[in-house]
Amino acid sequence: MDDLAFKQAAALSFGVELELQLVNTRDCDLTRGASDLLAVVERKPHPGDIKPEITESMIELSTSIHTRHGELLAELRQIRDAVLAGADRLNIGVAGGGAHPFQHWSQRKIFESPRFKHLSDLYGYLAKQFTIFGQHVHIGCPSGDEALYLLHSMSRYVPHFIALSAASPYYQGVDTAFDSSRLNSVFAFPLSGRAPFVRRWEEFQAYFARMQGFGIVEDMKDFYWDIRPKPEYGTIEIRVCDTPVTVERAAALAAYAQALARYLLVERPHPLSEEVYHVYSYNRFQACRFGLEGEFADPHTQEKRSLREDIIATLDALAVHARELDAEEGLDEISDCVRTSGNDARWMREVYAKSHSLPDLVWRQAERWRGERT
């Protein structure tokens, strides 16, 4: 299966993809601006990649490959500034956050491309409901076997990434009572959730061949798993994060993933077995619903603690690895999130509590994306 050959990548290299909201500066609702914005942005050179997503109300930006947090953050800021320069010319607002607080999915327009048309035909209204906004983190792996080891080992920590990045408490005009409502939209897709527990790349190739033989999938993009291998890049891709409201938080989450990957690969702290998935759905729900205050059931020790406590303990374990990777600044941001400031969902609720205006909240999100700490 040469078409699923795993491309060797530098171990622990990493990159980020961010899906962003395009909003009308008059009423702060989503606007159909992707085609016009991309045409303007591409007239000037910029780092990374800026491309369309499934509807006209969103774009995706991608960084190049990095090994250090500081370099990744610097590039994210440059790409952000390039997008904002184009958006300002068109009077379009740009914001982070995992879901727009009050847009209505029926008003969205599918971006004109063969793949997005195929998804719209296949999934019906779910395609427009997929106007949600996530951060994906890629971690480089030297082999397919190593990628599968890291994928399954990292699955214990999926609730960490959900709780730390949660930025979608409001959806369709209401407080959902979830810190991350975005992932509920992903759950609706038949190929979402967790990857199958296979440990060798040859086994995964055989699994993929069976799914392809059924006509269920054509390529890896058809899987919407929380973590999926990306053999063409030589990475695993963590897909559970809401898009944060700042690039600083986005870079910090990537640094946390990189340091965690080093810890898992170097120290091998947990036996690798399918037991990691026994409490997977429970822990995932707790993180979506309650964020950092959610309950975490440790699949290895059978102990329960809060997600906040588990992340703090993990940060202690990652300290030496963060130093080796020059990722300490990123993990300091994560520590502040857990110990002091809280996640973006908390910030959003605090902003709304002052104005009781969802349009005002979106405006503040756009200001914060610019780097204005309002």
Image (cartoon, rainbow, N blue to C red):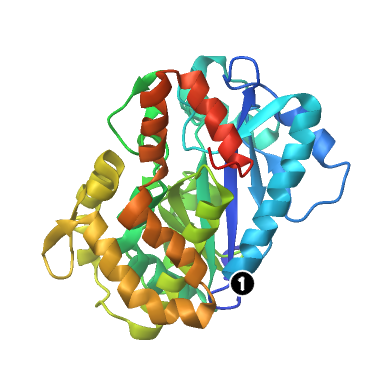
| Residue 144, image x, y percentages | 49, 73
| Residue 314, image x, y percentages | 30, 69
| Residue 369, image x, y percentages | 59, 40
Tell me if residue 1 can be seen: no
Residue found at the far right of this picture = 43
- Quarter of the image for the N terminus: give it: bottom right
Front-most of residues 165 and 145 = 165
Residue drawn at x 82%, y 34% as measured from the top left: 39
Q: Is residue 224 left or right of residue 29?
A: left
Tell me if residue 224 can be seen: yes
| Residue 69, image x, y percentages | 57, 67
Note whether 51 is above or below 205 in the view shown.
above
Kind of residue at disc 1: Lys
Front-most of residues 96 and 120 = 96
Note whether 76 is above or below 202 in the view shown.
above
- Residue beneath disc 1: 7
Q: Is residue 360 left or right of residue 288?
A: right
Q: Is residue 111 left or right of residue 104?
A: right
Displayed quadrant of residue 114: top right
Note whether 47 is above or below 24 in the view shown.
below
User: Number of marks in the image?
Assistant: 1
Residue drawn at x 13%, y 70% as measured from the top left: 301
